[in-house]
Image (cartoon, rainbow, N blue to C red):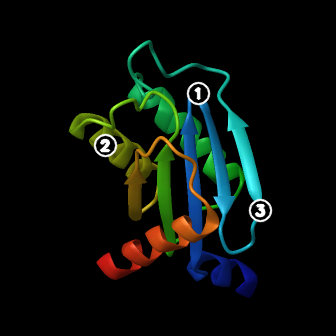
Amino acid sequence: MLKNIIQKFKKRRLYIQLYKNNVAIKDIDTQKNHQSVSEIPFNNDRLLIADFNKAVTFYKTTFKQLNLINFNTKALIHQKEMNKNGLSEVEIRVIEEVFERVGLKSIYISDLEKDLNDKEIENYFKIIQSKN
C-alpha cells in the first residue's frame, strides 16, 4: 500500500511523441520507452487529432495501462507528423485539452520538425519547471 502511495507522488517526466494514431512515450528518468498504436483512427487528411473523443480514449487507455500518470507528471509533447509550418493555435489547444483529460497538468508542446536529443529534452523540462 505504501508503494502505491509513493507511486502517486513520485516525480515523473515524460517525452511524448505524437504520430498518426500512434504515440511513443519515453520516461526520462527511467529511460524506458513505450509505443502504442490505436486500432481506431482519430486523424484525418488535415489533422493529427480530428476526432477528439477517440483520441482522448486512446491516450487515456494507453497511459492508464502503462501506469504513467500521477500527481507530479510533467510532459514534453512533440507532434512529429502533420505539423508542417508549425501548429496552429487551435491544434495546440486540442493537444492541451486532450492531455488535460488524460491527467497531465504540466505540459509543454513542441512542434519542431526535427528530432530532439536528450540535452534539448532536458532544456525543455527546465522551462517547464520554471513555469511551475
Q: Helix or strand or loop: what does disc 1 sit on?
A: loop
Discs 2, 1 touching: Cβ within 8 Å: no
Question: Which residue has dot 3 on it?
Answer: 32
Outermost top residue: 45
Residue type at tag 1? Asn
**Rendering coords of residue 82 (x, y %):** 45, 27
- Tally of numbered discs: 3
Is 5 placed above or below 108 here? below
Badges 1 and 3: C-beta atoms under 8 Å apart?
no
- The mark nearer the N terminus, 1 or 3, is 1
Judge the density around disc 1: few (<14), some (14-19), many (≥20) Cα neighbours within 10 Å.
many
The residue sitting at 66% across, 45% down in the picture is 24
Image coordinates for residue 64, horizontal then vertical, percent: 64, 52
Distance between the Cα atoms at labels 2 and 1?
17 Å
Which residue is most to the front? 114
Residue farthest along the left direction in this orientation: 89
Seen from the viewer's position, the closer of residues 97 and 126 is 126
**Is the residue 17 above or below the residue 7 in the image?**
above
Residue that label 1 marks: 21
Which residue is the site of mark 2?
92
Residue 132 in view (yes/no): no
On the image, the x and y values in percent for residue 59 come to 56, 42
Residue at image location 58% in from the left, 48% down from the top: 115
Question: Mark 3: which amino acid?
Answer: Lys
Cα distance in 3D space between marks 3 and 2: 26 Å
How far, Cα to Cα, is label 1 from label 3? 21 Å
Mark 2 belongs to which amino acid? Answer: Ile
Q: Residue at x 54, y 40 (%)?
A: 18
Element type at marker 2?
helix
Vertical arrangement, residue 23 with respect to residue 103, above or below: above
Taking the image as shown, residue 131 lies to the left or right of residue 103, namely left
Helix, strand or loop under label 3:
loop
